[in-house]
Structure formats: structure tokens, C-alpha cells
Image (spheres, rainbow, N blue to C red):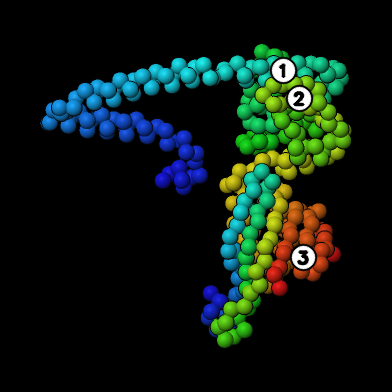
Amino acid sequence: MVFVATAGRPYYLAGLYVPLAAAGALRLQRRRETAPSRRRWLIWLGYGLSVASAAAVLILSVSIARPDVGERIAQRAATAYYALPTERGERTVVFGESYIVTAYVDGYSKRYQQPEAYSTNRSYGYFPPPPAGDDTVLYVGRDPGALRTYFADVRTVGDVGDDMRAYLLTGQRQSWDEIWPRVRTLTREELEEVFQKYQRAVIEVGKTWDWSGYADHFTEDAKYVEHAMGNWKAAKTSASGSFRR
Amino acid sequence: MNTFPGSEMPVYPVEWYSIDTHKGWVIFKNINTMKDPGDGSVHGAPVITVLEYAGDDKWSYEEDALFL
């Protein structure tokens, strides 16, 4: 219930397997004590099978796990970083597509003498944006996606493995302070909250019929499209605090 | 709220909404409910709205599609 209410992940419940297994074992033990079964061999078969499958999963998971994958990504990102001319490298921020990749780069940053990585993915987006003077991005991931719009040139500079590449983004078009909130992958909670605030404001407008504060919920360069009146766009004016055509 | 005769409170009930965390969009359908004309009847027009979030509690884009 707690995890459903807090929008948790299903695997958060994995810890509950322990009390479940304990309850099952206790119950089985009590049954054996009160009424010894003639089918005891079946229970032993069950024991054997569980032990065998547990051992199999253990062996399989060790062989499937690739503990070196994180280090390889960090190492290849560092190689791409050091391939840059020194003058360029000093203005370059390493940027991870996902928080996982970013954490790999961060975790091995000492070993590979690499600067700390930035990301707009999940909680990384809540760290401050890169310094204003750093106008080049070494992007580690599948595709720079939304970040492309904010840079004049995007080119591939290396292969990182696992379907990922290192991209060099140059020709920054806007400041990090402007880019950051736009490319940050938001949490559902943040959007829920801001939408609730917006709805409350709209209900307030409904009560007072005073639309003057409505535009305060929009940025200065916000656009408005209204289909019933034909497609038209409006820009907010800072003077009146309302929308104009 | 709107059925009481003479109610002066137009409301915008949100019928459903959907949140796209990756794009930062909130898409919702609401009924732009008109002021009660006085006889307790409810009149409204459904609208589907797209809001694009810009951060800092502000939206940078609104698109309304009304069914008139």
C-alpha cells in the first residue's frame, strides 16, 4: 500500500519474500509435527528442487552479470574526452544520457582523471547546471535528443559500447540556466504538483473572473494556440501580464 | 457547485489528465462550464488542452482544442 501510494517500483516489495517464506516454513514445520505425512518423499523432492533452482539462479546470475560494463563506459568516455584539443577540453562538460551512465562516469572520474559528469536525467537534473563558460558537451548515450536543439553542431567522436556513442556538441546557443529546466527529465511528482497549482489558479479565475494573474503561470515567451479561433499564437507581454496576439 | 440556482462560480472540472514526464507535457480534457443561467442547468464545452512545462512553476506553451 505504501509503495502504491508513493508511486514506488514493484521490486521494492522483494523484501517481503522473507516473511512470506518464514511463514510458509513455520506452517510446514507445524504440520509435520502434528500429522506426519505418508508422502514425506514429496516434501524432500520439493526441498531438493528449491535448493537446486536457487543454486542454478546464483550460478546463472554470476555468469550473466557484467560488473566491468560501468568501468568500460567510463574509460571510453575518458578516451573521447582526452582526444579533444586541450583548449577545447577545458570548456567541455561530460554529460550522461541516463543517471546510470552519469554515475559510472562520476564513480570512475578519479581513476580516469575525468571531470565530474552532468545529466538532466532524474535526480541529476536537480544538481546545478554546468558553469556558464563551459560551452561544449561530450555527450555519452544513445542520442543527444532534446539537447541537439541548443547546439549548432553535433558529431560522433567515439564508440562507448552498449549501443552508446560519445557525441561532441559545439556552438552553444543558449545559456545553461535557460537550457537546464527545459531538458531536465522531470519527475511525475513535480508535474503533478505544478498542475494542481495551475488548476487551483484556474478555479480561482472562475470565481473572480479576473484573468490578469493567469499569465503569471506562463513564461515570458510562452506560446498559445487555440484551434477554435483558427490557429494563432500569442506571446505574453511582461507589461500587462496577459496574452496578446 | 453549479446546480445551485444563481451560482456565480463557473468551474473547470478536469475529466482526465495525462502526464508525459519525458516531454514535460500535461494533457487534459475539461469541460469549460458556463455560469449557471439561473435555472440550475449546466452548460459547458469540452476542451482538450496541452501544457508544456518550462520549469520554475511556469508553462511555456498552451494549446486548446475546443469542440464547438
The percent coordinates of residue A156 (x first, y second) are 81, 26
The percent coordinates of residue A61 (x first, y second) are 49, 20
Residue A227: numbered disc: 3
Q: Earlier in the sequence, mark 1 or mark 2?
A: 1
Q: On the rendered image, what quadrant is the C terminus of chain B found in?
A: bottom right
* Chain ID, mark 2: A
Dot 2 falls on a residue whose secondary structure is strand
Residue A76: numbered disc: 1
* Chain ID, mark 3: A
Left or right: residue A14 compared with residue B4 = left
What amino acid is at disc 3?
A: His
The percent coordinates of residue A138 (x first, y second) are 77, 26
Query: Which residue does the numbered mark 2 point to in the structure image?
Result: A166
The percent coordinates of residue A122 (x first, y second) are 63, 37
What amino acid is at disc 2?
A: Ala
Circles 1 and 2, Cβ within 8 Å, touching? The answer is yes
Same-chain check, marks 1 and 3: yes
Q: Is residue A158 visible?
A: yes
Q: Residues within 10 Å of mark 1 (few under 14, many from 20)?
A: many
